[in-house]
Amino acid sequence: MQKEIMSNTLKILCADMVQKANSGHPGAPMGLSDIAVVLSHHLHLNPQDSSWLNRDRLVFSGGHCSALVYSLLHLWGFDVSLEDLKQFRQLGSKTPGHPEFGHTHGVEITTGPLGQGVANAVGFAMASKYAQRILGENVISHFVYCLCGDGDLEEGISYEACSLAGHHQLSNLILIYDSNKITIEGGTEIALSENIARRFEAQGFDVFECDGHNFDSIDLAIKSAKESCKPALIIAHTVIGKNAVGVEGSHKTHGAPLGAEVVAASKEFMGFEKDQAFVIAQEVKSAFEASIAKGMSECEKWKKSLSQEVQSKIAELQNPDFSQVQYPAFKQGDKVATRVSNGEILNAIARSYSGLVGGSADLGPSNNTLLKNEGDFPKGRNLHFGVREHAMGAICNGIANYGLFLPYCATFFVFSDYMAPSVRVASIMKTQVMYVWTHDSIGVGEDGATHQPIEQLSHFRAMPNLLVFRPADANENIACMQVALEMKAPSAFVLSRQNLEVLSPVSKDQVQKGAYVILESENPDVILLATGSEVNLALKGAEMLKNQGKSVRVVSMPCMELFSQQDQAYQDSILSNRNKTIAIEASRGMEWYRYAKVVIGMDSFGASGKGDDLFVFFKISVEEIVKKAQEI
């Protein structure tokens, strides 16, 4: 009876929150409340030490279950008050429409776009498995739970992530599938007919089923999943909007308030006063706190059990000293692709910091992302994601939020489009993930337009909190990496396939300001502004213009976002006159008009041909620079 009262309290709290906000999703929270009560008795959490490393991780992939998330956090004793529940979805509240990491105490990761949370959970589980290997099974022994729905499993990202989870036999991963057979448009049969159980069995999961409203059935399924040697899927057969009188089981409960009459009738049906809102009996609050009290006790035992060696290792992973990195030396005048120099830089960091982990979407030899002599996951630090860009990005978000590792992931820049949703979520969270995106322009050459990124730079530069670095050469690449390592934010490295001439060394301080003068002229007739491979073109153009009697300043801008953060005085010292500035970049480059009167870039997609020929064909050349400079 106590569990039923606990569950009904959750249902009413969620209904009240959505009703007061006149916005939100009551159906899934009410349908999952019985599972949430049972899960409370299995979770090892500590609200007083929410960053405890060996805590269980709980991910709500369906961010529309936020009312349930916040209700649970309040009842468990996290820093979410009853007043916070009353401010659900209001501006400035701790309880936004979808859970946000770093905003609400106890939320492990930002979810919202369906399927992301499933892949995040796989990332948590992978990080946990590797942490267990290097720290010991007595130190890391927790589970990762993920609640997901039909929408999550329909999104392709979940298929990719679960395929990898099954391949690695992540026995610490438990997915709980809220199988209520309802979508926004109606019953799932309008668009979904596959056998989910067989799908997951084929991917290497153990599959269990339960009545999602029978406490004993739920408990047995969770216990069985915890004993499995494989990742587990629990198919919980539930009813959306459970106990919502008159609309139980209807898609109408998914994304809109139930209405005052339905809420009142539902309260009466469950034994509550129909005209009272946000009521939590003291015995219910105490029951929820007691359900996770064992986690608090386990946390204290865990802390006392740690050896000095393990404590030191954890401290080293969580507080890296990147000043000790011995970066490679690159000789001025040599020709080195920035994808190649970046690979050497990653290996230098890995030798100094054991928390660097990462890999590529089956493009390691091309992206140059293999960590030498480090082995493959789960025994080593090299992650082989397979051709799974969607999941790769979200998995790295989970690895980063786990709290021990700095992850990187790589693909061709044109395929970064597949990663955009997870990069966006990382940027919202300001989570430190490094993206290595190679083959950055028409310099890709013969593969043609489908493999030549044109608009991607503009897209990612428009994304708040994301630092996009496009280094001009190997030495600038080092400085970009030094800056990125110090930033608590995601960073993208957009790198060349073709060899680029190594220029003179550049300092971290110069790159930290986003742009700097690489060739000075005090009172320039023309300012040439460029990034990446086009910096060398700008320098050659400046030499030709100098021979024609023009004074030219050349500016390298490896990170537009950092430059935009500088004060106006610094910006003016670099780009003193927009009307005299020409921006050069092998991309669509609409954002350059903020700084330049003329932009030499791409007005179309690319073509198939030799890279050098393509630069000439699309007029991204020394000759075009000279021509445009003469017209200013």
Image (cartoon, rainbow, N blue to C red):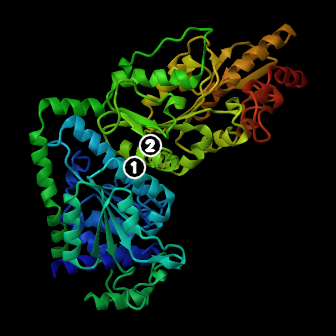
Numbered circle sitting on residue 385: 2
Residue situated in front as seen by the camera: 606 or 573: 606
Q: Give how far across and how far down residue 261 sits, in percent.
A: 42, 90
Quadrant of the image occupied by residue 497: top right
Task: Give amino acid for label 2.
Answer: Phe
The residue that appears at 39% across and 79% down in the rendered structure is: 240
Q: Quadrant of the C terminus?
A: top right
Q: Give how far across and how far down residue 559 sits, in percent.
A: 59, 30
Residue situated in front as seen by the camera: 425 or 160: 160
Classify residue 613 as left or right of residue 519: right
Classify residue 414 as left or right of residue 274: right
Quadrant of the image occupied by residue 265: bottom left
Numbered circle sitting on residue 164: 1
Q: What SS does tag 1 mark?
A: helix
Numbered circle sitting on residue 483: none
510 versus 579 height, above or below: above
